[in-house]
Image: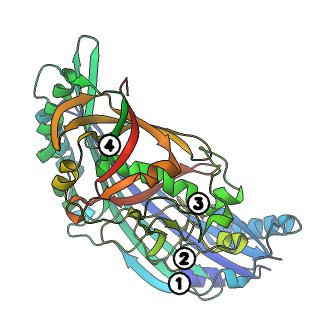
Amino acid sequence: MSRNLTQRLNTLRHQADWIGVREVKETIKYCKARNGKFEQNTTTVDHGLMVEVLVDGQFAYCGTDNLSEQSLQEACDKAVHLAKCMSSWGIYPYTSNHRPKAIGQYYSSTKTPFENVNGGDIIRILVDATEKMKVSDKIVNCMAHAILVEQDIMLVSSAGSNIQQQIRSVASQLMATAQDGTEIQTRSTGIPSQQGGLELLEKMPLIQEAERIGREALELLNAEPCPSGSFDLVLAPDQLYLQVHESIGHPLELDRILGDERNYAGWSFVQLSDFGHLQYGSPLLNVTFDPTVLGEYASYAFDDTGLAATRQYLIKEGKLLRGLGGIDSQERAGVPGVASTRASSWNRPPIDRMANVNLEPGETSFNDMIANVERGVYMMTNSSWSIDDYRRKFQFGCEYAKLIEDGKLTKTLRNPNYRGTTSTFWKNLKKVGDISTFEILGSPYCGKGEPNQAIRVGHAVPTCLFENIDVFGGSS
Ligand SMILES: [Zn+2]
């Protein structure tokens, strides 16, 4: 990283009303094993600079992966030229007040730094996990992978901003596929993803969970098909986190509501007039934007415009309060938002994203939740999803389910699915699991924007019970 990015900024010649430079260096280590053998051990390094300028009320950007002074000056000149070209077509008259001075640091909490281990040790853990998943000859494919990310971000500006953030994270996955004739079933851990050091590889469900994953894949081959009908539905955190992501996170992104973002099932059923009024779900529904949770995948202190990130309720007791939008969208939309303007790397401008979007725990233990259900289905681990481009109608499939009969978990069910509409579904939230059911999860792959920006998001959620949900069987 640059020794003195502020000095580099100060040497740039420009006519901008405000200028900022964001330097990002990201090292991604990807390790993979399959069926007892090493398959992949690669490291990629991406390092560059993004210049952002404000000229005549218009922001514009230009990035470069050439770190020289000349290239930085050229990027600055191009950004100023672009801003001048666009300023007469601007949709909002921005000022330097939209990039206030910010100074601070953020460091992921790590016990074992990545430098202290070699790829061979990680590969050995993964190979071992694939061997333990093969509990039968009917297990035909076992895969284990881990993604280790070191991301350093520096942001300086002509307003005197100086922000440094060092993010370290680990995501991993185990997956076993069982086959008997034409019946094929897959069971996995999902993709547990958190900030931290190599200690996460020991803590994450690799070796400990491997045998269970194999056994459950095998069990699904002879499980009964999931029944169809209206049921009480209990969702485990490794399914519910994606339900929150798709039917709360994305529809609350202010750039979708403003009409900017129309890719990847863009737009939203939410209107700007809904903030402060809309009853999004049952009074048990409390959803926060919380970048302060230690170890959650998308924790940070500042977004990529330099806005300080704080915990905020998006939905409180079911009522919609805030959107997922940074300072620019908040100004345009005239509604409260959060510090969530983020770029996937140095070569992208920041846009409205999720970060950590969490469903807050309630008061019901897992046993009490199940005991409350006369006839229902308990579904675990997402396997498929589909949602329309207003984020209204959805359908999800899970890997594994249990029938609930008279307050007890009974038969294992295969190919479980459910569908619904966003507002009815969240209004049917009947019980929210207590802190013992609460899990800190996340995803490395939230896609948005054009050109595409894949970004890491965190979701911490408890187990929850929904009533009168349309459940159905079939392939998933
Ligand atoms: Zn997403």
Residue 185 position within the rendered picture, expressed as x and y whole percent measured from the top left:
27, 25
The alpha-carbon separation of the residues under discs 2 and 3 comes to: 24 Å
Local SS, label 4: strand
In three-dimensional space, the C-alpha distance between marks 2 and 1, rounded to whole angstroms, equals 6 Å
- Dot 2, crowdedness within 10 Å: few (<14), some or many (≥20)? many
Whichever of callouts 2 and 3 sits on the residue coming sooner in the sequence is: 2
- Left/right of residue 154 with respect to residue 475 in the rendered view: right
Q: Is residue 327 above or below residue 280?
A: below
Mark 4 nearby-residue class (10 Å; few <14, some 14–19, many ≥20): many
Question: Which residue is the site of mark 3?
Answer: 253
Q: Residue at x 38, y 67 (%)?
A: 167
Query: Label 3 vs label 1: CA separation?
Result: 27 Å
Cβ atoms at labels 4 and 1 below 8 Å apart? no
Which quadrant of the rendered structure holds the C terminus?
Answer: top left
Question: Which residue is more in the foreground, 32 or 109?
Answer: 109
State the residue in front, 167 or 455.
455
Residue at which label 1 appears: 162
Q: Which mark is first along the chain, 4 or 3?
A: 4
Place residue 358 in its image quadrant. bottom left
Of marks 2 and 4, the one in the foreground: 4
Q: Where is residue 73 in the image (x, y as percent from the top left)?
A: 70, 71
Residue at image point 68% right, 80% down: 98
Q: Nearer the viewer, residue 399 or 421?
A: 421
- Looking at the picture, does residue 189 appear above or below residue 35? below
